[in-house]
Amino acid sequence: MSDPVRILCIEDNPMNWRLVQRLLSQAGYEMHWAAEGLKGCEMALALTPALILLDINLPDLSGFEVATKLRQNPNLADTLIVALTAKSLRHDRETALVTGCDGFISKPIDPFLFVAQVEAYLGGQRDHLELGREKAALRQFSQQVVDHLEVQLREAQESNRKLLEAQDQLEQRSQSLSRLLSLSQDIIPLRDAKAILLRVMEQLATDLRFEHLCCYHLHDSGAYFQGLARTPEGFAETAVLPMDHPLAVWAEALVGGKVRSGAELRQSGCWQLGIELKLWAPLAQPLLIPLRSRSGRDQLWGFLAADRSQEAYLPFELELVAMHAGLLHGSLENAGLIAHLEETSRALATSYEGMETAYVELKEAQRALGAQNQRTALGGLFLNMARRLEGPVHSLRQESSALAEFMDRPEVPAPEDRMECHRAMGEIQGALDQVDRLVRAMLRRAGQDRASSPEWLNLHELFLEELELSRAAGLLPGGLRVELELQAPVDRIYGVSTDFTDVLGHLLEHALEGEPGRITLRSADSAGLFQLEVEDDGAPIDPAFLAAAFEPFPALRPEPLETGRRPGHGLSASVQLMNAYGGTVEILPLEQGSRVRISLPLE
């Protein structure tokens, strides 16, 4: 099957094109369209159609000029060009033929004949000039070209004039924007509202040649509008404007930031009110721009009004007025806000000084209270220690009296009496050791600064002293059995005593949470490591809690929903303390109770 015949229609009227397209598409032709002469030339070169239907009256190049251009291209030598035009005069037909058209179809198109006319030209039909008419047709075409060029020249001159006017306006606008930018930088440091008003209004009046210029803005009290007016005589403050003044009520209903001028103002209800307030003269070119509050309340903040007796305002001049008004509005609001912030800052500074003084006094009171609490705690501890020491002292007193009786006998003691002496001496030595441990522990507790310095420590002695102190302080229940299996051959380490007493305290706290009846304190040597174990026979630890037993900051974790015994909160702190000595902490859950083991390298 052969390809359909390709036809290009160069027609600026879409309705005519749709009619041509519908008729010829139904007849089986491949249709293409260009709405301009230059575009049609480009498409003709790209498509090389069999037929070009060419409208004579095109907006850019005329159809005659398009035909002449197409005929100059050898690639389109076999392409038919048929003119479509409403011009039916003889010289129009002759001009079409002399410029390179092969035929002529008049408009309006006859739908019943059009397809047959196109097929006739595709079948070989050609129109020809009458003999001797070529020169006249060429002269006619030349005249049309000249006329067309004259029209285009006038249009180009008019376009150039408009372009120069637009360029002049752009230059004026650029200069005005530059001055506006400079003005905005100049008024940034200003805080006085009147100074800001004077600077902005002076430049605006100069740039737009205003004869009258007035700016009303809401007073700080919010009860009325105050203003500043520029007249040929200079600047002056205006009379205040009540909130319920008709002009203020009218402006309240307007869209903020939109400039109204000329006839729009003269036909509004505020025209006569503005004349009475001397915002503009009756015969001048007026304008007004309402400004709405930026505080979120969307109420009328103020308005700017002006007039001049010269020409009407250009669009860019109205834009310039809106930008100046926005700059003035923003600068005044910012100045008020900055003044309020500075005042607040001064008040805060004064409050801060008072708070700082109060803080210093509070720290002094806190230190005094801490010292008092320490004295109170130590006093209670000394009381408990005194009660704890009553037993050893009573034993010392009794055993000393018994020994004194034996020592007073003139004869040598019998063997059974010597055994009793040795027993009494053992009781005395045990009581003395207990008193000695309590006294050393109490001195260490009272001298915390010295206890925070590293020194050589005997861990067994340190743990025994801390156990005695815990009993004296009432931290260990009276009926609790504490078993000691301190069998490590070496227990000497260089460190801070409070680190190890804190760790022992955390391990005892963990053991006590299971409410045990027995706690065993055990030490041993394993592969060169000093191991300390605290074992209890209390409630077993729920396995669900073991994974997070050593995580830091346990108080920040949400409480789990499961019930059961949890590891002690101080175990994570014990891990941190022992890490500093290269040690480890582990929990060994038991069927009844738990065992916490600490492993430390002593070297």
Image (spheres, helix red, strand yellow):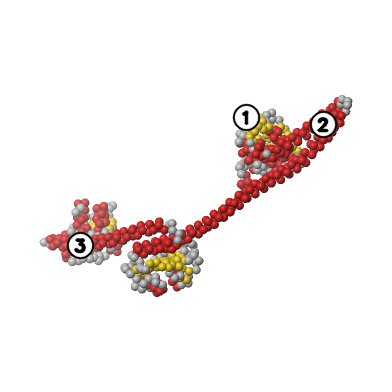
Check residue 407 in the rendering and tell me which mark sits there, or answer none.
none
Query: Extreme left residue here?
Result: 132
- Measure the C-alpha gap from mark 2 to mark 1: 40 Å
- Tag 2 near tag 1, CB within 8 Å: no
Task: Give the x, y percent position of residue 441.
Answer: 71, 37
Callout 3: few (<14), some (14-19), or many (20+) C-alpha neighbours within 10 Å? few
Type of amino acid at the residue the image marks with label 2: Ala
* Residue depicted at 65% across the width and 42% down the height: 570
Callout 1: few (<14), some (14-19), or many (20+) C-alpha neighbours within 10 Å? few
Q: Which residue is mark 2?
A: 424
Check residue 150 in the rendering and tell me which mark sits there, or answer none.
3
Type of amino acid at the residue the image marks with label 3: Glu
Can residue 591 be seen here? no
Left-right relation of 85 to 182: left
Who is closer to the viewer here, 529 or 265? 265
How many labels were placed on the picture? 3
Check residue 603 in the rendering and tell me which mark sits there, or answer none.
1
